[in-house]
Image: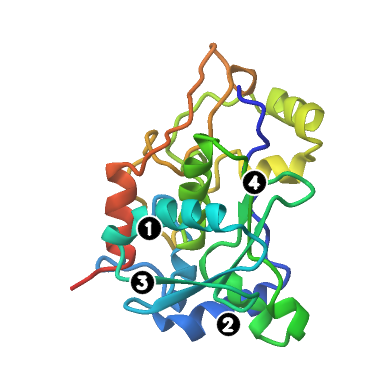
Amino acid sequence: MNSFKPCQIPQPKNDAASYIAAINERPLNALKIQSNRPKRNIGAHTKYWATGRTLKIAMYDASDEVIEEVKAAASEWLPYVNLKFDFVTGDTGDIRIHINPPNGVNSSEIGTDALIDDIGGTDAERRAPSMFLNWKSGSQRFRYVVLHEFGHALGAMHAHQHPDSEIPWNVQNTYKHCAKKYGWNKADVDTNILPLPRSHQHAYEPYDGDSVMHYEIPREWTFGNWGQSESWAISNGDIIMMRKAYPKD
C-alpha cells in the first residue's frame, strides 16, 4: 500500500443545515429516488449542485504552478457534467481549496455541504476551506488526488463503500491497521472505508471497481489476500453517474 493518508470525508457538523443547503441549491435534492431520478455510484444524490450553474472555486494559498495543476485535473470532469468552473483568487467561493494542510489529509465536503456555513455561519466559517489537497512538486499522483476530491465536491461518495462491492472485508483487521497507520478510530473507518448500508431512498449504479472514487484496498484489510490498486482515471461508471446527476439536455 502507498504511504499516503487516505482521503477522509468530513461529516456535516449540522445535518439540518446540510439538508437546507442542498434543497436551496437544487430542490430535487429533497426528493426520494424515483425511476426517472439520477442514480448514484455511490453518489450523495441529495447534495448535487444546480445543473447549468458556474461553480466559483477559490484557491487562496496556492502558487501559479499548483493552481494550473488543479485546474487541469479538475477540468477532466467538465465534459460529463452540466456545470462550469470559475477559478478565482481569494477565499470566497462555492468550493474553497487549501493546499498542504498540516495534518496531511486530502478531503472534500460532499457537494452542497460546502455551503453549510452559508446558513447561520459566521463570515470566517463561510470562508473556511471546503477541500484540502496535498501537493508535492512533480507528483504524478496529485492529478488523481484532485480528480478524486473533485468527485466528492460534485456529490460522489467512495465507490469501495458500495453495498454490492463484495469486497471480502476483514473488519477487525481494518480497524487495527487504520488505527496503527493513520490514527483512525472505528467511526473514521466506518465512515470512509467499510460498506455503507443500503437505503430504500437511493438507487444504485452497479459497483465500479475502476472508479476514480475507489480507494486502494490493501491486503491487510481483507480476507483471502484480496487487494486492489488505485484507479487514476475517470471510469466509464464515473461518467455514467455524473451524466445522470448533471444532465446536459
The location of residue 47, given as percent across then percent down, is 49, 69
Q: Is residue 138 left or right of residue 71?
A: right
Whichever of labels 2 and 3 marks the residue nearer the N terminus, that label is 2
Q: Are marks 1 and 2 in contact (CB under 8 Å)?
A: no
The x, y position of residue 21, in whole percent, is: 56, 80
Which of disc 4 and disc 1 is earlier in sequence?
Answer: 1
* Image side of residue 104 versus residue 96, left or right: right
Distance from label 1 to label 2 (Cα)? 28 Å
Q: Is residue 61 left or right of residue 139?
A: right
Q: Is residue 70 above or below residue 161?
A: below
Q: Which mark is residue 84?
A: 3
Query: Does residue 82 lie above or below 169 as drawn?
Result: below
Mark sitting earlier along the chain (3/4): 3
Q: What residue does disc 2 label?
A: 20
Mark 2 vs 3: CB contact within 8 A: no
Q: Residue at label 4? A: 134
Label 3's element?
strand
**Residue 96: horizontal and vertical position, in percent?**
61, 68
Q: Residues within 10 Å of mark 3 (few under 14, many from 20)?
A: some
* Residue at 51% across, 61% down: 153
- Which amino acid does the dot numbered 2 rest on? Ile
Q: Amino acid at mark 1?
A: Ser
Are discs 2 and 4 less than 8 Å apart at CB? no
Horizontal relation, residue 61 to residue 83: left or right: right
> Which residue is more in the foreground, 139 or 56?
139
| The N terminus lies in quadrant | top right
| First in residue order: circle 3 vs circle 1 | 1
Local secondary structure at mark 1:
helix
